[in-house]
RNA sequence: GCUCCCGUGGUGUAGUCCGGCCAAUCAUCACGGCCUCUCGAGCCGUAAACUCGGGUUCAAAUCCCGACGGGAGCACCA
């Protein structure tokens, strides 16, 4: 009785479609659903089109109320268009088995971590978690010119702050011995050679696809040259014997090892021959058991080299994957762009709150959990994008709002004298909905301070409310505003303005803006807002993130007696 | 220039592998309303997208070809 079944199904979907679209069903859309429903049974689409078509015709004749009533009986589940929950978890990994996935995060210890690193680290770490696997932290410190001792620790601190824990940690530089022997193996196989050409000539040869004379010497000679390279001061580089005519320029005999005389932060002058990223990256991923290494898209052309090397060395090939780099509008998300800003003094340092470094983000009150959610929402696509920072702010705000204590901060204050004000001790809650966060008590007299900007909008005769206190009516506006008490009952619609008494503390809040606007450095990107905060703020501790009402979320920092705020976002 | 990757609302993203349940997800932004002793949060609503052109198919965001646009690489940096 399949035809009867099809009819019923068509009727159902026609009703649903009609209800969704003003009582008129679209046969094409309905047929699609019906076909999908009978996919297994190999029914001719033509038949379904016919049936769906007539179903729609019939359904469209009846009024929408009846349509609803009928669908209610037939298939009530189709009636409610349920809101689909977006699943923000990472997509499944190919060839992944629970307990057997190994990932790695391989930073070069050459600077503090930024949000781009965080994306990689979070993805690596989360995948290991997802599959109950292992996560390795590996310092790719194979260039003594870049690696600096302080950053091994600093980067670990940054990761810990993010909430990332690693199962294993090691330095690539500790494996140089192994690298050397693999190199020798390649040379002996005739797959790598020592090249004495100057770097310009190598570049030139690569550009034109021309092999150089070093390439044609015998493996035995190259083994000798290699040993000389390692032991004496003979110059040269070790290159892969790839294909100098390959369309992929990464395959035109890439350099595998080169000489760097500068002492290494860990190994001093023990080594002078160092592997390049192409070699070290591939070899380390394979040897350390990594199953799913990730890297950013700009390495894509080097995949071929990665696999070729492993093949020649007869090493296991991991499942290498790429995703796009994170870029944020108006923010420099790379060491290359951040460093010059610091060197030129355009920002205060690696923890400048305008920077997307983890230290900068931390300082302005961005929480690790927000960064995590932000990274998940971005996913691991290969499409380039230019994200707005406000996306991260939104994630952060959602976390902060229910837990941040509220205080009054008066930006650019102006004095307000309330005549006939009585002396009060007022207890005001620290959070509008969560009573557990407690309250503070403020003693008020006749002197207040309120934001100048609010007073500019208010005229003599207007009534406004000192928030959580009482109403006042403005009598005179000069350098000081004079007002009179105007009742404590809330007047709906009246402005509610934050205030301090004369028992205030002076504080500055630094408000970050975009470092770049239309691609140009913005010299006004950091604003210092001067103001008065209520006295209770002086008892906050460094690192607390609070909301200054009608101003924004601010992270507090205390040095000696001075309190400074760093603005996170509204 | 050559090679590779990518192209879904203003922004970001799901869906693309395996064509139909997609007249397309979720978020952000914008706008409106409700609520609130914050310009915050919450709630409700509105607006807004498959780069273009061909092809295959009963059926294309999804497959194929081409164009266009964007990005990356062409280091003895990672």
Image (spheres, rainbow, N blue to C red):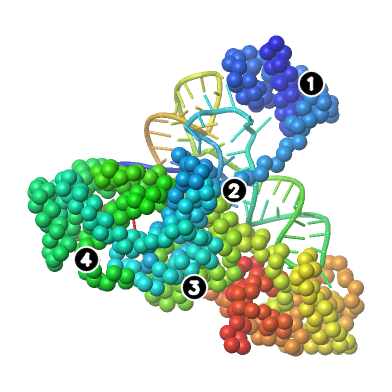
Name the residue carrying label 3: A351
User: Disc 4 sits on a residue from what chain?
Assistant: A
Question: Which label sits in the foreground, 3 or 2?
Answer: 2
Residue A8: where, in percent of width, then height?
73, 18
Residue A272, label in figure:
4
- Mark 2 vs mark 4, CA separation in Å: 46 Å
Residue A376: where, in percent of width, then height?
55, 52
Asked if marks 2 and 1 touch (Cβ < 8 Å), the reply is no
Residue A525, label in figure:
none
User: Disc 3 sits on a residue from what chain?
Assistant: A
Residue lying furthest top in this view? A1
- Mark 4 vs mark 1, CA separation in Å: 85 Å
Residue positioned 64% across, 16% down in the render: A48
- SS label for mark 3: loop
Which comes before the other along the chain, label 3 or label 1?
1
- Mark 2 vs mark 1, CA separation in Å: 42 Å
Q: Are marks 4 and 1 on the same chain?
A: yes
Foreground pick, A117 / A64:
A117
For the C terminus of chain A, the image quarter is bottom right
Name the residue carrying label 2: A88
Q: How many marks?
A: 4
Foreground pick, B54 / A328:
A328
User: Disc 1 sits on a residue from what chain?
Assistant: A
- Mark 3 vs mark 2, CA separation in Å: 30 Å
Question: Which label sits in the foreground, 4 or 3?
Answer: 4
Which comes before the other along the chain, label 2 or label 4?
2
User: Disc 2 sits on a residue from what chain?
Assistant: A
């Amino acid at each position: 009785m399949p035809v009867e079944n099809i009819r019923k199904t068509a009727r159902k979907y026609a009703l649903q479609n009609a209800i969704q679209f003003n009582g008129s069903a679209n046969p094409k859309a309905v047929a699609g659903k019906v076909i999908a429903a009978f996919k297994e049974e190999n029914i001719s689409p033509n038949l379904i089109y016919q049936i769906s078509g007539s179903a729609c015709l019939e359904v469209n004749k009846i009024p929408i109320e009846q349509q609803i009533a009928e669908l209610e009986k037939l298939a009530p589940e189709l009636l409610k268009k349920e809101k689909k929950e977006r699943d923000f978890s990472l997509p499944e990994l190919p060839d992944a088995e629970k307990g057997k996935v190994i990932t790695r995060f391989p930073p070069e210890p050459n600077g503090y971590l930024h949000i781009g690193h965080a994306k990689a680290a979070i993805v690596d770490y989360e995948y290991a978690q997802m599959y109950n696997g292992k996560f390795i932290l590996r310092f790719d410190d194979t260039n003594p010119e870049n690696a600096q001792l302080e950053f091994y620790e600093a980067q670990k601190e940054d990761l810990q702050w993010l909430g990332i824990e690693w199962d294993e940690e090691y330095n690539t530089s500790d494996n140089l011995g192994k690298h050397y022997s693999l190199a020798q193996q390649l040379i002996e196989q005739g797959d790598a050679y020592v090249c004495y050409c100057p770097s310009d000539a190598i570049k030139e040869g690569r550009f034109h696809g021309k092999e150089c004379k070093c390439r044609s010497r015998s493996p035995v000679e190259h083994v000798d040259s290699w040993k000389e390279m390692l032991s004496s001061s003979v110059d040269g580089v070790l290159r892969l014997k790839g294909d100098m005519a390959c369309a992929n320029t990464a395959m035109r005999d890439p350099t595998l090892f080169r000489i760097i005389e500068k002492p290494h932060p860990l190994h001093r002058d023990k080594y002078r021959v160092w592997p390049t990223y192409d070699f070290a990256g591939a070899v380390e991923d394979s040897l350390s058991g990594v199953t799913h290494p990730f890297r950013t898209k700009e390495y894509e052309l080097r995949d071929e080299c990665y696999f070729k090397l492993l093949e020649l060395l007869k090493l296991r090939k991991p499942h290498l994957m790429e995703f796009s780099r994170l870029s944020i509008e108006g923010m420099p998300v790379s060491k290359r762009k951040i460093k010059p800003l610091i060197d030129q003094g355009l920002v205060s340092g690696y923890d400048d709150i305008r920077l997307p470094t983890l230290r900068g983000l931390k300082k302005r009150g961005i929480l690790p959990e927000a960064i995590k959610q932000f990274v998940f929402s971005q996913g691991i696509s290969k499409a380039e994008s230019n994200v707005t920072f406000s996306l991260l702010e939104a994630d952060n705000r959602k976390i902060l709002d229910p837990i941040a204590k509220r205080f009054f901060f008066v930006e650019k204050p102006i004095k307000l004298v309330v005549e006939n004000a009585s002396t009060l001790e007022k207890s005001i809650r620290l959070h509008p909905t969560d009573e557990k966060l407690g309250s503070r008590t403020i003693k008020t007299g006749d002197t207040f301070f309120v934001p100048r900007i609010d007073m500019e909008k208010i005229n003599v005769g207007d009534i406004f409310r000192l928030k959580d206190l009482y109403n006042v009516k403005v009598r005179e506006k000069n350098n000081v505003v004079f007002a009179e008490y105007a009742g404590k009952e809330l007047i709906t619609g009246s402005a509610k303005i934050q205030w301090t008494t004369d028992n205030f503390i002076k504080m500055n809040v630094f408000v970050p803006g975009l470092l770049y606007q239309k691609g140009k450095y913005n010299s006004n990107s950091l604003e210092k807002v001067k103001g008065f905060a209520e006295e209770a703020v002086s008892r906050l501790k460094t690192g607390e993130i609070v909301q200054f009402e009608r101003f924004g979320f601010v992270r507090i920092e205390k040095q000696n007696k001075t309190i400074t705020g760093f603005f996170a976002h509204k």
